[in-house]
Image (cartoon, grey):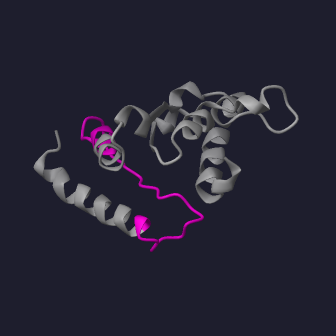
Amino acid sequence: KIYFQHFFRLFFFHLAIRRKENGWYDEDHPLVFLFLGSSGIGKTELAKQVAAYLHKDIKKGFIRIDMSEYQEKHEVSKFIGSPPGYVGHEEGGQLTRALAACPNAVVLFDETEKAHPDVLTALLQLFDEVGHI
């Protein structure tokens, strides 16, 4: 499924993942890759291949979140869960529930340009503060 043009990209990801596994990266932060490009160039397929490399069960190891479902400000809680003290806090959000099932999963945030800016802010904070999840 991976075409030749993706070979070197996959090799780069392999090296980065190996460095993370060997402890050469900051353990307090997740390993984050940003795939950019127009539709149909293989971003999703590459994320799936990275998940297949890391996990035997790709169904658990790959999480796709359609960010177009989070176009309203109040949907931040649907994404990461309600704040402490609010109804439903224990349930978590779509992202937190998925990561609870497989903490080292590859997460694809698809169509991020359609999400509300507050949802994107929460997402960026999660990249910086892993303990917040």
Q: Is residue 118 left or right of residue 16?
A: right
Does the magenta run of residues contain 60?
Answer: no
Left or right of 32: which side holds 85?
right
Expressed as whole percent of the image width and height from the top left, the position of residue 43 reads: 31, 43
| Residue 62 falls left or right of residue 14 | right
* Place of residue 84 in the rendered image (x, y in percent of width and height, measured from the top left): 83, 39
Q: Nearer the viewer, residue 124 or 13?
A: 13
**Which region shows up in magenta?**
20-47
Specify the quadrant of the image occupied by residue 18.
Answer: bottom left
- Return the residue found at the far right: 85
Residue 62 visible here: no
Main secondary-structure element of the magenta-colored stretch: loop
Q: Position of residue 44 (x, y in %)?
A: 32, 38
Residue at 46% from the left image edge and 56% from the top image edge: 32
Residue 108, placed above or below residue 93: below
Identity of the residue drawn at 80% across and 38% down:
83
Residue closest to the far left: 4
Task: Please say if 126 is above or below 27.
Answer: above
- In this view, the residue farthest toward the bottom is 24
**Residue appearing at x 37%, y 49% in the figure:** 35
Q: Is residue 38 magenta?
A: yes
Could you say which is closer to the camera, residue 120 or residue 91? Answer: 91
Residue 90 position, x and y percent, is: 76, 32
What is the quadrant of residue 131 in the picture? bottom right
Drawn side of residue 67 relative to residue 49, left or right = right
